[in-house]
Amino acid sequence: MNLSMFFPPISSASLRFMLAVALLLLPLTAFAETGGAAANVPELSASFYGYLSIAIFILAYSLVPLENNIHLLKSKPVLVAAGLIWILVALAFKEIGATEQAHHAIKHAIIEYAELFLFLLVAMTYINALEDRNVFQALRAYLVSRGYSLRKVFWVTGALSFVISPIADNLTTALLMGAVVMAVGGSNIRFVSIACINVVVAANAGGAFSPFGDITTLMVWQKGKVEFLEFLPLFIPSLVNWLVPAVIMNFAIPNEIPEASQEKSFMKRGAKVMMVLFLVTIVTAVSFHSFLHLPPAAGMMFGLGYLGMYSFYLKKVEGRTIMADSIFGGRSDAHQNPLSVLQAYGKDIGEHLNDQPYPAFMIDKEKSVTHWNTALEELTGIKAEEVIGTKDHWKGFYKDQRPTLADAVLEDESGAGVRQHYQNKYRDNPMGGKSYDAASYFDNIGSSGAYLMFSAAPVVDESGETVGAVELFEDMTEKREEVKEFDVMERVSRAEWDTLLFFYGVILCVAGLSQFGYMAIVSELMYNDLGPTWANGLVGVLSAIVDNIPVMFAVLTMDPAMSLGQWQLVTLTAGVGGSMLAIGSAAGVALLGTARGVYTFASHLKWTPAIALGYVASIGVHLLINGV
């Protein structure tokens, strides 16, 4: 495709301006080159306060990419920089007798941040709630157990990254799909590295056509530059942005089939309801913005109320689920499976129950007790002779008659009885063969109750016919984790506070620099000299180097006069440009940490030409089908 038909010609002088902006070094230097633009720039841009503000911002932001090396949270330097810059703004405005202007300016910046903060806080809370309900873990377990070839995993994880990130955001999506890639790829370093690159590109591309997919798209939507449905035309350009490098990288993926994992994970109670509530919350936010002309953040906070009310319901009916999970958590992965004794003794297990450290009993096919070991006598206080030959084994655990786990195992082979009587309190035992673990609190065990984990399995004879069931118990009272009910406020507390505070620092820094007139200078350079198409293409390149959030906020602060097509273009480029470097997006930085030593800056850089080709192709497709 000849992109010159879409891009206006660019002069050598404009190339000098492009380089100046790309380096992000002292916009004053660029200002000096523009000559005639000086008359339109406030005098404060050439002041000592302005120079010092730029130096502070550059110094603070240079520490952000080093977060993992120097272990300094990225929010800390930008928070300090924001405070210092606004001190300088206040002093500068005081000297020219415009104190009130600084006051109103910082209030405006804080209000802009507050809307972004509240919106993101609700979105992060929902994501944390879904994580607590094992939604992402269940998806991961499903994928790693499918037995897909490496090439199919490459495409499946990429496609899922593309379709999940518009809702769950690109960072969460990249972490989830990255975990799948590493679980399947194992020691195949080449596959894991390329698949991680694919996940980063797909997650960033998917987030570009939705207000909920990235911080930059959210900022553009909240500013009213692009309405909710007007993001949808970016779908095809975003898809092209992912597919072009994916097709190229596909040929480097071996088509071998790794051994399938046996990992299992199930969603907890309320997971599906919370997914629906999240979608309803998104609809609410869109409705507030589109129909009521209220800030989307107000709609999101309304949606947080939905989750809050549902969490109150969960507290009432689901404490036992969280409790069961905490009891399961008391058993380490290295812990011996109590039911492993079945493999050694088979149908003769009853004769060896007294040799086991676990309290245990055995029932026959008619659910009559055949064995009741000494350890169980000590646990329940009921002697063997009191229950053997009867069906009263339930009395050792429950006040009212009800099926034990061993009874439920015998009821039918489908496991329906287990699900009916132990819903949300059981899991499959690793031994398989219709064996289960369950957990609960028994207030009639001991002097003050006990938290027990119990396992049951059918006992079969040599011909494979079921002749009874055995159930073994383990007292987890001292080992179990602290019981926690689902609490929406706890989910709020687990939001990415460092990220939220980082956004505050960035927004206040850029807003402060704009008071010195630097955004006007850069806007003059980029949008007047280069033209909006080249300028918006440059935004994506800058996003790969600096991070798209300050770049996009700077563009919004400049507020250049552009058509809808150009605002869509800058939304696209800011969203996908960061894929060109591993450090250019939150998704890439996150996987650099989780796949440390395998997915690296250098391994990503090898594929930057392919990613850049997808970047250019996506711009061309947008200009072709959406216009400017």
Image (cartoon, grey):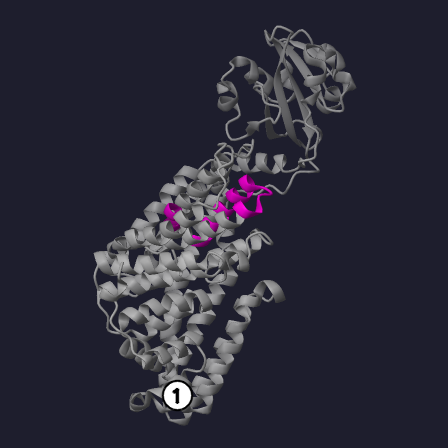
Front residue of this view, candidates 67 and 308: 67
**In the depicted structure, whether residue 332 falls above or below residue 281:** above
Q: Quadrant of the N terminus?
A: bottom left
Q: Residue at x 65, y 29 (%)?
A: 452
Where residue 215 sits in the image (x, y, percent)?
A: 39, 60
Where residue 606 sits in the image (x, y, percent)?
A: 49, 57
Q: Residue at x 50, y 82 (%)?
A: 55
Where residue 345 sits in the image (x, y, percent)?
A: 72, 14
Q: Which residues are magenta?
A: 162-191
Whether residue 163 is in magenta: the answer is yes
Judge from the rendering whether residue 286 lies leftward or rightward of residue 420; answer left or right. left
**In the depicted structure, whether residue 367 falls above or below residue 240:** above
Front residue of this view, candidates 44 and 268: 44
Front residue of this view, candidates 210 and 593: 593
**In the depicted structure, whether residue 159 falls above or below residue 411:** below
Q: What is the three-letter code of the residue carrying label 1?
A: Ser
Where residue 396 sits in the image (x, y, percent)?
A: 66, 20
**In the depicted structure, whether residue 18 falls above or below residue 429:** below
- Residue 21 image-quadrant placement: bottom left
Judge from the rendering whether residue 184 lies leftward or rightward of residue 219; answer left or right. right
Residue 256 seen anywhere in this rendered image of the structure: yes
Judge from the rendering whether residue 385 lies leftward or rightward of residue 574; answer left or right. right
Whether residue 107 is in magenta: the answer is no
Residue that label 1 marks: 45
Element under label 1?
A: helix
Residue 6 seen anywhere in this rendered image of the structure: no
Q: Residue at x 41, y 90 (%)?
A: 46
Magenta stretch, main secondary structure class: helix
